[in-house]
Amino acid sequence: MTIPPVRSSTRRTERIAGWLPAGPDRTRRSGARTALRLGLLALGIWPEAGAPAGAAADGSAAATPARAPAYEYRQEHDPNGLGKFYLGREIAHVMGHQGADWLERPERIAEEKPDLVVPALRLKPGETVADIGAGTGYFSWRLATAVGPKGTVLAVDIQQEMLDLLATNMTQRGITNVRPVLGAVADPKLPVAAVDLVLMVDVYHEFSEPYEMLHAICAALRPGGRVAFVEYRAEDPSVPIKQVHKMTEVQVRREAELHALEWVETIRTLPRQHVILFRKRR
């Protein structure tokens, strides 16, 4: 059954939330939210990393880690970020579903060479892959083709509107081995020890709870399973993306290696991004 597409938003000024310059009103709202966070933290009632451990009630891989590096909130920050910092890096705003057409723009083929990404991952037929932050399924169908009909792609997004668009796109392409998964900000809702590879394309830098998400991702990996970060290169000032939407290789490794992940290689063949691969330690 073909799922009807989501109607486009008429608020064109919010097509790409967090990627377009912020106006004065948005800056004031961001500062007010940050001030509220700081006040609640002072009172000890704002949820923060390092909370007591708890198990995921739905049987997914997530369980809050017993101890995590503390997040920091700053009133002075990039208007394209949350004002929330993790290991010195400001977390970026999430791109809203109103900007879905930007993910599918025709010029992306020339700008980013996405068809080089999946072959570099060396997937095998029959594997289970999680595409986290799948959006419209731009990479999901490519992954589905690589793992074949006996493989599975778990396409995770926290916006149901994105998953609706993804389902429509998969139907139009005749792809039947992609399963949409509605995730949460700290839990991708993946099964435990069931995933061979997790792919995150231009999305990790937007996770509002990066430590908790990577903790859950590691729990979802099979022994020896891999994680691939595809991020715009912050080392290269010529990459035409806002700074909070880019990451250095050093920063990615710093954050990933807090978990049961060991660096495998960094692929630098893409025009604007690097592909940083890790393997779950056995």
Image (cartoon, grey):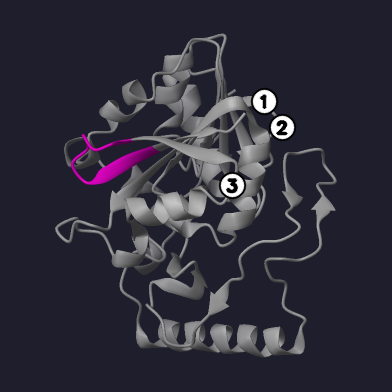
SS of the residue under disc 3: loop
Using the numbered discs, state the Cα–Cα distance from disc 3 to disc 2 in whole angstroms.
Answer: 18 Å
Q: Position of residue 265 (x, y in %)?
A: 35, 34
Residue beneath disc 1: 194
Tell me whether the residue at label 2 lies in contact with that at label 1, contact meaning CB atoms closer than 8 angstroms: yes
Identify which residue, 3 or 161, lies in the foreground: 161
- Marks 3 and 1, how far apart in space? 18 Å
Q: Is residue 89 left or right of residue 232?
A: right
Report which residue position mark 3 lands on: 259
The 10 Å Cα crowd at callout 2, few under 14, some 14 to 19, many 20 or more, is some
Q: Is the residue marked by circle 3 packed among few (<14), some (14-19), or many (20+) residues within 10 Å?
A: some
Amino acid type shown at disc 1 = Ala
Q: Which residues are magenta?
A: 266-276
Residue 2 vertical position relative to residue 256 in the rendered view, above or below: above
Which residue type carries mark 3? His
| Residue 185 shows in this picture | no
